[in-house]
Amino acid sequence: MHRRHIVVLTGAGISAESGIPTFRGSGGLWFKYRIEDVATPEAFARDPAMVLDFYNQRRAQLESVQPNQAHKALARLEQGHKVSVVTQNVDDLHERAGSTSVLHLHGQLRRARSTVAPDWTMDIGYGPIRMGDTCPLGSQLRPDVVWFGEPVPAMDEARDVVASADVLLIVGTSLGVYPAAYLAHDAPAGAEIIVVDPEAREERVPGARIFREKAAGRVPLLVAELLENPA
Ligand code: APR
């Protein structure tokens, strides 16, 4: 079977049917919290306890939700193709579904990071980070996520991955946040581009095959199609 390189760019929408709120859809997180209060370095400097609490709540919820059929289908896709997941999500649902190649552009809820040595991170599971929790160098721990205004260290690697795609599958992202959104345009000429999003906007991914449907319904069908049609 001729294996193709399927790159899957995912956003909050793929985890919506697992019960995790998106950011900009109805009930989205940015309708309940102001980004400048909980997701910027300035917010953390101003009120670290508030920022830690915002992520502690999201991390605790993560323990109580499960991967959905979309996450599971993407893991199954590895049986017939090379699959690279590039996600903007900080949840661990792709990994828990069984995907083995997951690149987190915006970090991971389950990891904490030193505030003086950014390369020092640790897996903290679903537990909280509290004021006074320090790294071995004695600095306060912070969530290992990318805040607005911070660089996206994995961006170069992500662009290389997308540049080698035979198929770019974009699931559940508004493609409104940069630089991640640039990836929708980094697929090589001739690559097939497929979008799954109830509110997909044609102009954001010109020439794509668009399914204005929810991920848990459509992604398993696309995976079956990709597994049946190897070349
Ligand atoms: N199936 C597929 N797509 C869905 C579903 C679903 N069940 N429900 C919602 N969506 C779509 C919405 O239509 C929207 O286009 O998912 C997208 C979610 O968009 P956002 O809430 O903007 O989330 P995302 O694109 O991941 O945000 C990017 O912004 O706030 C920052 O760092 C944060 O990683 C995040 C980044």
Image (cartoon, rainbow, N blue to C red):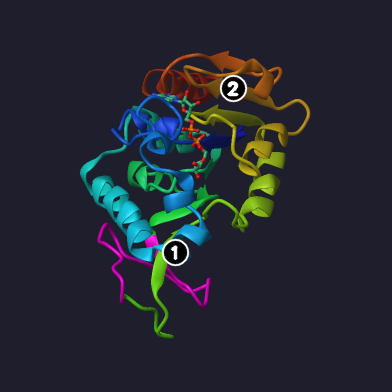
Instruction: Name the residue rendered at 43%, 35% in the picture.
Output: 23
Question: Was residue 77 drawn as part of the magenta stretch in this picture?
Answer: no
Along the line of sight, the residue nearer the viewer: 228 or 60: 60
Question: Along the horizontal axis of the image, is 22 left or right of 185?
Answer: left
> Going by the picture, which residue comes out furthest to the right?
189
- Name which quarter of the figure residue 202 lies in: top right
What is the quadrant of the C terminus in the image? top right
Q: Which residue is mark 2?
A: 194
Q: Is residue 24 above or below residue 103?
A: above
Q: Position of residue 218 (x, y in %)?
A: 43, 18
Task: Give the main secondary structure, helix, strand or loop, of the magenta stretch.
Answer: loop
Query: Where residue 20 sits in the image (x, y, percent)?
Result: 32, 36
Nearer mark to the viewer, of 1 and 2: 1
Residue at the spot x=30%, y=33% of the render? Answer: 18
> Residue 119 at what x, y percent from top left?
53, 72
Name the residue at 25% across, 46% down: 61
Q: Secondary structure at mark 2?
A: strand
Query: What range is drawn magenta here?
Result: 111-132
Q: Foreground: 13 or 221? A: 13
In screen coordinates, is 171 left or right of 17? right
Q: Is residue 10 left or right of residue 51?
A: right
Q: Quarter holding the N terminus?
A: top right
The image quadrant of residue 111 is: bottom left
Whether disc 1's CB lies below 8 Å from ligand 1 is answered no
